[in-house]
Image (cartoon, helix red, strand yellow):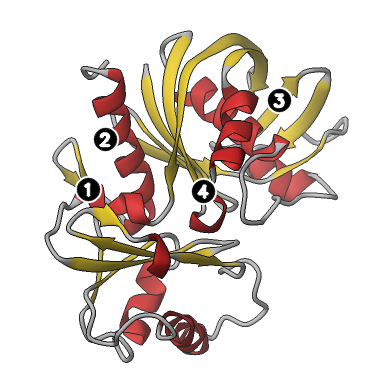
Amino acid sequence: MILGIDAGNRKTKVVTAEGAYLFESAMGEYRERRLKDRFGEDDMVFEHEGRRGFAGTLALYESEFVGTRKGETKAHEEAKLRVLLAIHRYSRDMVNDIVVGQPISTHTEEEKKKIIDMLKGEHILAVDYGDGFIEKKIVIRRVRVAVEGCSAVLTQPTHGLVRIIDVGSGTINFGTVDDMRLVDRDSFTERFGLETIKSRDYAALARKIANTALTKWNEYDIVKLIGGGAIPLIDHLRAYFPNCELLQPIHNGKVLSPVFANVVAFYRIGEVLYGERH
């Protein structure tokens, strides 16, 4: 099965031939619970390589050391578990071909190889969604690592110069595409996001984003806004970039939130690389 997976720090997004999905990315330690209330559809207990833990909404409510690892690379164990949970939840096949993402600043051959080596191969994952553990053998046959931010333009192919601001929970990607070609010189990642700041003053955050971007970009550039922060920031960013607009991808005839822009692009890449839709 072909899957596009964006293993974000706040939400993990997944796109398959059937649809687009997301779930809470939080992870925390396991403990025996006396009161076993449910907190949402994303309640998960997982077992993997001898480790048991809480994930999703269950981790948010019941783990003392809940959190997600934020940073400029996804070559780490938490991202691996998010990808495996995504496949466990949404794949109907044992053998899977996937496309995942990596921030612009660490989209290097070395970091991509780490991610591919980490994910490719056979994995055993058991997940309890509330009715007992379901153990699955997951085979990841092929892995490609796409660049976050810039890849989103594949969902709306555009001629000319396009800037992309990808507002995530832990990082913000500033991407540049010219006639559908990635421009490395004017693309970069900053290590702050919606979950790393104490204030919820979106006007102030937009000013910081704009001041960062304007060191390389022009205020009248075409700017596409994606990610979890796109909707709350769009009006504020238009004060600095008059031609700023939301990029809302379309999948299976449905217009989706900008939060799915990267992962829809990852799935499109998978379709091209891996063949017909499964």
Instruction: Tell me the number on the disc at residue 46.
Output: 3
What secondary structure is found at the residue carrying circle 4?
loop
Task: Verify CB contact (< 8 Å) between mark 2 and mark 1.
Answer: yes
Q: Amino acid at mark 1?
A: Thr
Give the vertical position of 274 relative to 136 (above or below): below
What secondary structure is found at the residue carrying circle 2?
helix
Residue labelled with disc 1: 155
Mark earlier in primary sequence (3, 2):
3
Residue 82: x, y in percent?
60, 35
Instruction: Tell me the number on the disc at residue 47.
Output: none
Q: Label 1 vs label 4: CA separation?
A: 20 Å
Residue 7: x, y in percent?
53, 42
Residue labelled with disc 4: 107
Identify the residue shown where x is 17% and y is 58%: 179
Mark earlier in primary sequence (1, 3):
3
Q: Quadrant of the N terminus?
A: top left
Mark earlier in primary sequence (4, 2):
4
Identify the residue shown where x is 56% and y is 28%: 116
Give the vertical position of 115 relative to 210 (above or below): above
Tell me where residue 206 sits by quadrant. Answer: bottom left
Q: Give the side of residue 39 with respect to residue 214, left or right.
A: right
Task: Verify CB contact (< 8 Å) between mark 1 and mark 3.
Answer: no
Q: Label 4 vs label 3: CA separation?
A: 29 Å
Residue labelled with disc 2: 268
- Mark 4: give few (<14), some (14-19) or many (20+) Cα within 10 Å: some
The answer to whether residue 180 shows anywhere in this view is yes
Q: Amino acid at mark 4?
A: His
What secondary structure is found at the residue carrying circle 1?
helix
State which mark lies toward you, 1 or 4. 4
Mark earlier in primary sequence (2, 1):
1
Q: Amino acid at mark 2?
A: Arg
